[in-house]
Image: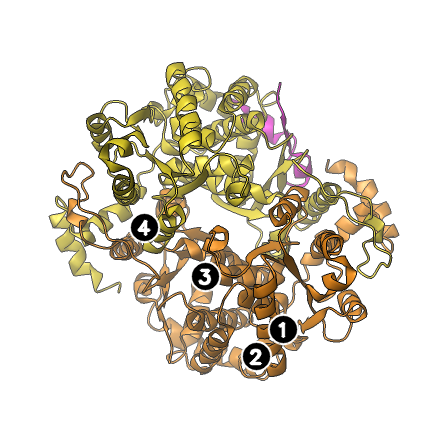
Chain colours: A orange, B yellow
Amino acid sequence: MTTIKFDYSPLTKFVHENELPEIQKMVTACDDELRHKTGAGKDFIGYVDLPVEYDHEEFDRIKKAAAKIRQDSEVFVAIGIGGSYLGARMACDFLNLNYGNWQKDHEGPIVLFAGNSISGTYLQEILDLIGDKSFSINVISKSGTTTEPSIAFRVLKKKLVDKYGKEEAAKRIYATTDKAKGALKTEADAEGYEEFVVPDAIGGRYSVMSAVGLLPIAVAGGDIDKLMEGFAAGREAYSNPDLSQNEAYQYAALRNILMRKGYNVEILENYEPSLQYLGEWWKQLAGESEGKDQKGIYPSSANFSTDLHSLGQYIQEGQRFLFETVVMVDHPKYDVEIPVEEEDLDGLKYLEGKNMNYVNEQAYRGVVIAHTDGGVPVMTIHIDQQDEFTLGQLVYFFEIAIGISGYLNGINPFNQPGVEDYKRNMFALLGKPGFEEQTNEIKQREGDFF
Amino acid sequence: MTTIKFDYSPLTKFVHENELPEIQKMVTACDDELRHKTGAGKDFIGYVDLPVEYDHEEFDRIKKAAAKIRQDSEVFVAIGIGGSYLGARMACDFLNLNYGNWQKDHEGPIVLFAGNSISGTYLQEILDLIGDKSFSINVISKSGTTTEPSIAFRVLKKKLVDKYGKEEAAKRIYATTDKAKGALKTEADAEGYEEFVVPDAIGGRYSVMSAVGLLPIAVAGGDIDKLMEGFAAGREAYSNPDLSQNEAYQYAALRNILMRKGYNVEILENYEPSLQYLGEWWKQLAGESEGKDQKGIYPSSANFSTDLHSLGQYIQEGQRFLFETVVMVDHPKYDVEIPVEEEDLDGLKYLEGKNMNYVNEQAYRGVVIAHTDGGVPVMTIHIDQQDEFTLGQLVYFFEIAIGISGYLNGINPFNQPGVEDYKRNMFALLGKPGFEEQTNEIKQREGDFF
């Protein structure tokens, strides 16, 4: 059973019927590399079987920890960056768990995210928002030494210890980290924090369905059993290498076909504001997986209809190197009827008694036709609703598609060598011990830049 | 006096010294078109002199209305889309007026935005958030017939009338619309709403410093006197056509030079989460102004250091058609010291006693050098702080730069013909009276797409 439907009907103008069959052999080869873990980045392909190969004991502990936190904390701060932030944030928004955070009658804690920037202003505001409320922390870092989360953890831990004392504070710190080694693992063992595991064989941007994402999602009120069911249904639905049978592979193949025609920028779009962070999560997944060796599709995102009154002009008539992938919710959570008015000053009488979601759907259809006419290929991923089951499937859809897509482009989709470059410079500029040589070098070059 | 400093030092690798002088003549010609209002879109160049030519009586009424709303409303809903949304939203975030919205001791109303999508779920959540709180509405629409804000206005007006009765409701509706004609103007006159003007000679995306943006910003607690002072300072600072004297023109010229070398995607970046919507506002300003006639730079945005762990990989090593413009805050609002710990498990001992903003600054510097080495041109707009005066200048900087930039590219930066295409299709699909012919046409084509 799948609650997702991929539709590329509008591509007829851009992709000939023979093109998908002609790429099948390559897709099959990539599928083989991925399934048998023989391709580039083979040590990080664990996410493919994660839906059926996860630690059930830990999964139960996640639910218990979430229940405790929902009981004893008014605020919950998830500390992480990159894959240790965007997945949980995306899921909480997607499931509409966040919007009511500040409602008086909101059940469970307010979920905040920290350690996802180096802004002192942002962290100070988090401290102010916590104020004198009861709170718990989930620090998420495989190494425990990533600069952003480490700083935020020091600061928030101090607030926790000041408030509760060292012993009680330790009971309010949940560490999601390496199973065996690293700074955070060592500290968690020594202090007795409850521990969850960032799996070895899964890279950060593919980790939302591990403890990395599951604990924050569960604390926010998400049903992680249903989420895993959907994730497993995704694995079922997208396991056949035959392009005619596998919609995730169709998406992977078509975006590669389009790229080879010069469509080098993909915009992920939605018609629901709560899907904004799906775009942010996807940009990391796609961009960090494929943007290397001077190759890859540049991932961008837009929120419609908002951005139809913004980027819409560019998409319709700007340079022609764009293509669009829409994530369309077929059955949104709520709907609102357009009220009757006596006069028809605003010209909406023809819509009276109709629902907003119906209008939204026609906007989507009008855009698909207009942008196609304007020379922009559009594909759509229809999702039934914004629930946990569908989200689990959708995550699998994108993760497996991006794995295949990277391989099709001759790219290792599971490393991120370029992320180290700025870090090396930053450590050199900060005078980090061990970077003495780089510090000398960069100090000599600095004058050319600033 | 200017609190903004534009720095393009890192471009030496990409732009030769002769290139700016060589484009001076064209810049001068474009400046002439803009200042004398003789160029394309000449009826929409009013923003150039808006800092000194605005309605002072209305300005005072905006402040009075804002004071009344802050007194009598727990929630304030600004209804608008595109330029009638993004400017106010950007400013409220930039000035950090929003973060405390839900704090118990927050002064003034919670500011919400509606009419910026067609999502029934989003609007229902706005209704729920208002609940039984006292509230006022600012409906912002030149025509009064734009679909998104018109629907939201009908729904929220109904809630207002149900709660307060027709007479009191009319005192809680503020209409920002055309000065003389249109649906909303007619209704406002008939019902006695307080009215503010969307100026004729200023397009939506250039309108944040008119009543369109000023009322929501003032209600949120922004000092609009200081904002206008900064806006006027921007006009002073960026009025000289000589490139060596005008940093906004330098930015305009350099982004055109880079585009002509194949750098077709510009990423606007920040190191402060509260600048996320500066990117959204800028994307409309740049993309809607320049994305036409199959030309223009595609505008994208990123939030660092968050996205250094996401898009960062692509920027460092992906396809080489990107350039970056950073908006860097030199003196952020708050700072946080990195606490001392006994042990050095996380390896942060070398940063103890240092402040986060210092680390953030080194991250920025490290990124500039790394990305330049990776083949990505980087420019920086340094802003002194996130205050009203600086924001006013920054808005002028971008608005004048984009006007010049569009002209340099042979584009009318003041129209948006492509935005109508999807609307026409949507009206046809919805069966709007007057679109019968288009309805017939599109019904015949629909099967090819869905």
Q: In the rendered structure, which segment of residues is drawn in magenta?
A: B1-25
Parent chain of label 1: A
Please give the label number shown on residue A202.
1
Residue A309 colored in magenta in the image? no
**What is the spatial separation of the Cα atoms under label 1 and label 3, in whole angstroms?**
23 Å
The residue type indicated by label 3 comes to Phe
Gap between marks 4 and 1 measured at Cα: 38 Å
Residue labelled with disc 4:
B118
Alpha carbon separation for disc pair 1 and 2 = 9 Å
Q: Residue shown at 55%/19% (left/top)?
A: B233
Apparent side of residue B433 relative to residue A161 in the rendered image (left or right): left
Q: Amino acid at mark 2?
A: Leu
Quarter of the image for residue A23 reads bottom left
Q: Quadrant of the C terminus of chain B?
A: bottom left
Question: Looking at the image, can residue B131 be seen?
Answer: yes
Residue linked to disc 2: A50
N-terminal of the pair, mark 2 or mark 3, is 2
**Element at label 3:** helix
Q: Residues within 10 Å of mark 2 (few under 14, many from 20)?
A: many
